[in-house]
Image (cartoon, rainbow, N blue to C red):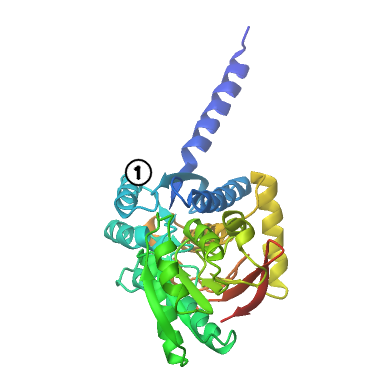
Amino acid sequence: MNTPFKLTVVATLAALSGLALAQEQVVKIGHVGPLSGAIAHLGKDNENGARLAIEELNAKGLNIGGKKIKFELLAEDDASDPKQGTAAAQKLVDANISGVIGHLNSGTTIPASRIYSDAGIPQISPSATNPKYTRQGYKTAFRVVADDVHLGGTLGRYAVKELKGKAIAVIDDRTAYGQGVAEEFEKAVKAAGGNLVGHEFTTDKATDFMSILTTFKGKKPDIIFFGGMDAVGGPMLKQMKSLGINAKFMGGDGICTTELVKLAGDAMADGQVICAEAGGVEGAQKKGMDEFGVKYKKRFNDDVKLYAPYVYDAVYVMVDAMQRAKSTNPAQYLPELAKTPGYKGVTGIIAFDAKGDIKNGALTLYTYKAGKRDQIAVVR
């Protein structure tokens, strides 16, 4: 039989429990990337980076603006398609997200950015490198990697000055990313006095490059630059080998993945591929990146493919701005996000310029030896 005292205690505990639940605030953060299609492995890598950060933040039991916060990740698939990307963006806006991390591709990030801007929702891309993204005047657009001007320009100069390329050919996949990085590469090659022998075009879904490569073979290129992703770059390397083209194969971060080794098979010779990844750490900072890799492997039983550390940092940078603003309301924390005062992430120090680009963004140059990526240098 319950006594009045026991009933009072139970009622009090229930009331306190209800109060605690009422004070807990669910904060939705969106993530968008290609979870289907040829580069779904990179999209899943990005999503995993976001998920790892969200899980860690929830384990910390953060309190923002006097409320206990529980973060919820809303993950959407844009399939690298601009139309699907804008549909995913609108779906997240309608779900009242407080911020979004993504998209992966420039081709989906740029059209989606208008939707987020119109809704006043902060967007941090961990991987879109086309300069246009942050040059549209949207106060909501940020990125944590260097853009194509830096990436393509660095590779172009490297091709002429370090690799001593005498006949340089270019192929791009006509996406916002592929075309953008190829154009910046060309500009830098010309500025450095290099000799361009041709520029051909393919698509991000193509599998046959024999016609393009046969055209180039007659021009005897010693360097072929590809603006595109690993899903196309791998088969292209195979067809280069079948035609006896022994040129160096260069590209941006789209081909600079651990997956390229599998996609190219035995067609990739040691030192043949030279690529650049937006971002990079050196010295003491490498320890943090290595530790992230171990943590990622333990959680997902897989290795980091490419951008996961940048997604992870982007989530933390966004939440750091919320904490400084003492609010998860986009209108309240957006000014603090823009003023991020040098956040120390696993990918390096993060602060933004007036356009939303990362300040002093790094690039890492890589080649491949014995089937593994081998770092050449970190440049800024």
Tag 1 residue: 95
Observer-nearest residue: 15 or 309?
309
Residue 153 at least partly seen: no
The local secondary structure at tag 1 comes to loop
Picture coordinates of residue 328, whole percent (x, y): 44, 54
- 197 horizontally vs 369: left or right: left
Q: Residue furthest top?
A: 1
Vertical position of residue 316 compared to residue 359: above or below: above
Does residue 245 appear in the picture of this structure? Answer: yes
Quarter placement of the N terminus: top right
Figure check: 187 above or below 315: below
Residue type of the residue flagged with mark 1 = Ala
Q: Position of residue 378 (x, y in %)?
A: 62, 78
- Can you say which quadrant of the picture contains the C terminus? bottom right
Q: Nearer the viewer, residue 60 or 195?
A: 195
User: Looking at the image, which residue is at 60% across and 67% down?
Assistant: 347
Relative to 364, does residue 126 appear above or below in the rendering? above
Q: Residue at x 41, y 74 (%)?
A: 182
* Front residue (pair 4, 318): 318
Residue at (69%, 71%) from the top-left corner?
A: 285
Residue 216: image quadrant is bottom left
Is 229 on the left-hand or right-hand side of 140? Answer: right
- 337 vs 373, nearest the viewer: 373
Bin the neighbour count of mark 1 within 10 Å (Cα to Cα): few under 14, some 14-19, many 20 and up: few
Tell me: residue 69, above or below residue 246. Answer: above
Q: Position of residue 282 (x, y in %)?
A: 68, 75
Q: Is residue 294 left or right of residue 51?
A: right
